[in-house]
Amino acid sequence: MANRGSFSGKIGFILAAAGSAVGLGNIWRFPYLAGQNGGAAFLVIYLICIFTLCFPVMIGEIAIGRKAQSDAYGSYQKLGGGKWGYLGLFGILAGVFILSFYNVVAGWAFGYFLEISFGNLLDTQDFGAFFGTYINNVGIISVFSIGFMVLTALVVSQGVQKGIEAANKIMMPALYAILIGLIIYSLTLPNAIEGVKFYLVPNLSEINTQTLFDGLRQAFFSLSLGMGTLMTYGSYVDKKQNIVASASIISIADTSVAFLAGLMVFPMVAAIGAYDVQGPSLVFVVLTEVFHNMGPTTGKIVGGSFFLLLCFAALTSTISLLEVPVAYLVDQKKLPRKPVVWGVATLIFVVGIPSLLSQGKVEFFSHLTFYKDRDFLTFISDMCDLSLTIGGCMLCIFIRGKWKIANMNEELSIGNPGYMNSYLRKYVSFSIMWTCPILLGILSLLIIFDKFVGIEYIFG
């Protein structure tokens, strides 16, 4: 297995896996979902879901990868045989499509970093109109997206230790440093305390079925479960490592970034009271207006730092997303890593072109008649959401019905001799057998209803 590469140790694996989980979902999606669902009420549900639903699935996914020492397809095929390998391919394809639109949004973020830091963006009067015009400048966004993909490919082409691990050892501490610096500044802004109260003082009466649905969906999406990323990374982990302890740290690291992102964003938006803004508008319109109100110099420094943070978060995820299909082709087709990396990166950029054109540039991609007139990027994003929950549900079914809970526990006990006699073993086993597949199955159905029927028909 030496030619596959491996992480140098526990820290390298944790930083890489945490980097995989930390992404645009933490910095952008988590705050706007929290704003729509009562702030602190959503935070409570999110934290509960992370450690009751997502943590056991993460442990199971890493255990499969380390036991099989292979990519997502190879892991399912080796431990399950038959047609189980197709479940791994399903996850790999999901990762490819996620990266295809993720790279477009990363291009937006990098463009805004340059526009705020070195341009005249903060001088505009209509930030919504600027955003709409900017993302339809296909030429410039293509350049930024290609640049982001090239940077991602450069890292992945260097292999596990020299590429993925080395990059995350730099970017993850930098991400935390920028995030904490922005939090400190945001807490000095006028009305910051109101934003903090909204975010940290829960009104449990605001918890409803929609809050539970969004919290559960965001928790699973946040940790990048169900598409083979952590399975692939787990295959690079040696037998001495304690998977349970590592998964605990990864969960805490990812959750802390989402939590801190909220602590950064809500004091900022408190100034204009825009707590419940949806989608890209929160980051690219509302926060840009906040940066404008800070004044030309401070706005450029704080706004530039924020979008640099967003770029770091995106890059840690794009690296792991690219590694999943690369590992499959290297393991299963015995192809050399570097040509595979550049070939797959090129293909994924091409797959992302409809998302690039879907924000008004091309009518066909901007208004899908079969998808409630939504744009192609939203369609791909929603379908990937669904694929992750289905993948997570099937992973639990695979462990329970094919690989067997006893084999998973045996793998988890390696590097953790006290695991077999612990309460945690009983909890993880029960969760994988019952709680997780049932909840993820229900969540998959709810996402289908939400996107194709309208969740209001269920939730009233």
Image (cartoon, rainbow, N blue to C red):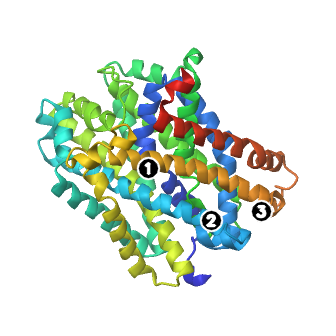
Residue holding disc 2: 234
Tell me the SS state at disc 3.
helix
Q: Please identify the quarter of the rendering in which residue 236 is found.
A: bottom right
Q: Please identify the quarter of the rendering in which residue 78 is found.
A: bottom right
| Figure quadrant of the C terminus | top right
Dot 1: few (<14), some (14–19), or many (≥20) neighbours within 10 Å? many
Instruction: Count up the numbered dots.
Output: 3
User: Is 150 rendered above or below residue 334?
Assistant: above
Which one is nearer the viewer's eye here, 179 or 96? 96
| Between marks 1 and 3 in the image, the one whose residue lies nearer the viewer | 3
Q: Please identify the quarter of the rendering in which residue 331 is found.
A: bottom right
Residue drawn at 41 percent across, 42 percent down: 27
Residue 10 visible in image: no
User: Is 121 rendered above or below residue 433?
Assistant: above
Q: x, y percentage for residue 158?
A: 42, 76
User: Is 78 rendered above or below residue 17?
Assistant: below
Q: x, y percentage for residue 251?
A: 60, 47
Tell me the SS state at disc 2.
helix
Tell me the SS state at disc 1.
loop
Q: x, y percentage for residue 457?
A: 52, 25
Chain-order first, disc 2 or disc 1: 1
Q: Residue furthest front?
A: 370
Chain-order first, disc 3 or disc 2: 2
Q: In the visual, does 325 lie left or right of 363?
A: right
Residue holding disc 3: 402
| Between marks 3 and 2 in the image, the one whose residue lies nearer the viewer | 3
Residue 23's disc number: 1
Residue drawn at 57 percent across, 21 percent down: 207
Chain-order first, disc 1 or disc 3: 1
Q: Amino acid at mark 2?
A: Gly
